[in-house]
Amino acid sequence: MMTYRLAIAALGLAITFAAPSAYAGPKDYEFQPISADVKKGAGSDVAVRLVDKRTGKPVEGAVIFRTRLDMSPDSMGEMTAKHAAAPSSEPSIYRFKADFTMAGGWALKLQAKVPGESDTVEGTVVFKAK
Ligand SMILES: [Cu+2]
């Protein structure tokens, strides 16, 4: 009987400690550059990967519904660049074509819907145009 009660108590503890990580939140995801170096000029390739930070695994099937590309890393936050989503053969890599009109630091700001996550996932990826 004693061991049974101990087992129940241990199970309760396990559930208590497991609970916080059982619920995913938007902060559990991160957009990362495939390559932080990009080519200055029109129609440059930009690619980001979405990773689940809890597992380190890539996340497939995110729907990126809003983006902004600006030079905020070089204190030119008002300077934006035209860009558009481009096809990707890998489901966890999200590609764009961008017109980097100036050499220097550019920030790609993304908002996405991620499968199984009700809140919007946001991320900023910094690139260096050369
Ligand atoms: Cu600039």
Image (cartoon, rainbow, N blue to C red):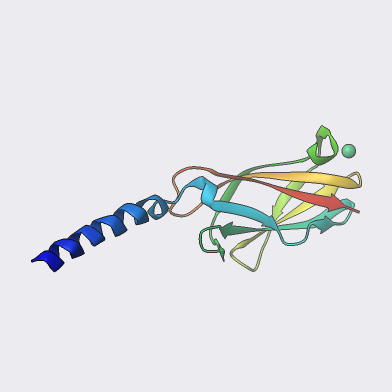
Q: Residue at x 91, y 47 (%)?
A: 103
Q: Quadrant of residue 39?
A: bottom right
Left or right position of 82 against 17: right
- The front one of 130 and 65 is 130
- The front one of 85 and 24 is 24
Report the quarter where the C terminus lies: bottom right
User: Residue 36 at what x, y percent from top left?
Assistant: 79, 57
Report the quarter where the N terminus lies: bottom left
Left or right position of 64 against 22: right
The answer to whether residue 56 is visible is yes
Q: Residue at x 47, y 47 (%)?
A: 25
Q: Residue at x 15, y 68 (%)?
A: 3
User: Residue 26 at what x, y percent from top left?
Assistant: 51, 46
Q: Residue at x 76, y 47 (%)?
A: 83
Q: Quadrant of residue 88?
A: bottom right
Q: Ligand 1 is located in which of the four quadrants? A: top right
User: Residue 114 at what x, y percent from top left?
Assistant: 51, 52
Relative to residue 78, is residue 37 depicted above or below? below
The answer to whether residue 113 is visible is no
